[in-house]
Amino acid sequence: ETGVTQTPRHLVMGMTNKKSLKCEQHLGHNAMYWYKQSAKKPLELMFVYNFKEQTENNSVPSRFSPECPNSSHLFLHLHTLQPEDSALYLCASSQLTGTGTLINEKLFFGSGTQLSVL
Amino acid sequence: DAKTTQPPSMDCAEGRAANLPCNHSTISGNEYVYWYRQIHSQGPQYIIHGLKNNETNEMASLIITEDRKSSTLILPHATLRDTAVYYCIVRGSGGYQKVTFGTGTKLQVIP
């Protein structure tokens, strides 16, 4: 148990569906991340939220829309996805200081959502 | 962040020490070496990190060469549950940093 919970664990959706992935961290961290891991590829950073503000959007297509309502929750809204978007989506959290300087380098990951787009 | 190079795969007999190497020849003075591992279809798990000195915790030991251009992660008594992909990452300590994962080393522990 890492203190980062992702739901659902598995998701199958059609290309016209709209769905959301949810991430919740119970560690009191103030930075949260979305990563994508396609089959046999390295993890790719998608989005970073630092104190609820988005600080990184790694050229992610607009069909992926993140939302961070507070420092404990992170969502990834999905719409009109493509089959090549099928992947393991991982959420992580870490602790940052008020100035944004990293004081705890460790990332804590959830177990991920395995997404299949048909 | 400095780039790292790791062998794509390694085998280790159960109960023996697993020594996983990592080259980071372009590392700069304020960059730490971090190790994570990822067991199949789960999120990566932090193992250990260090700057200059060797480090040890309940999971592993980290040996960093004096010139800091390479390091070795040591799992002292590998078990079947240590079968995973191991990632070596180098990153700075100040300000926001992207954590970039490479392809890592697939460690197979053999009974």
Image (tube, rainbow, N blue to C red):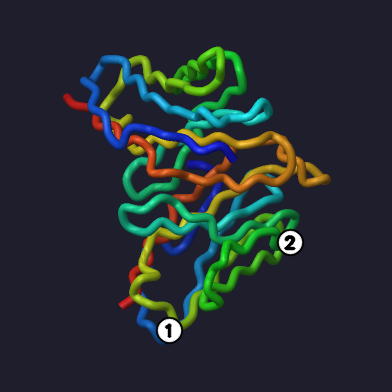
Secondary structure under tag 1 reads loop
Residue at mark 2: chain:
A
Residue extending farthest left: B111
Residue extending farthest front: B26
Instruction: Assess disc 1: are there few (<14), some (14-19) or many (≥20) residues with their C-alpha within 10 Å of its C-alpha.
Output: few
Instruction: Assess disc 2: are there few (<14), some (14-19) or many (≥20) residues with their C-alpha within 10 Å of its C-alpha.
Output: some
Q: Residue at 51%, 42% (x, y): give it.
A: A2
Quick one: B90 or A39, which is closer to the camera?
Answer: B90
Instruction: Identify residue type, mark 1.
Output: Asn
Q: Position of residue B18 (x, y in %)?
A: 32, 20
> Which quadrant of the structure image shows residue A66?
bottom right
Q: Which residue is mark 1?
A: A17
Quick one: B76 or B50, which is closer to the camera?
Answer: B50
Q: Position of residue A117 (x, y in %)?
A: 34, 74
> Which quadrant of the structure image shows residue B44?
top left
Q: Which residue is mark 2?
A: A53
Q: Position of residue A15 (x, y in %)?
A: 38, 83
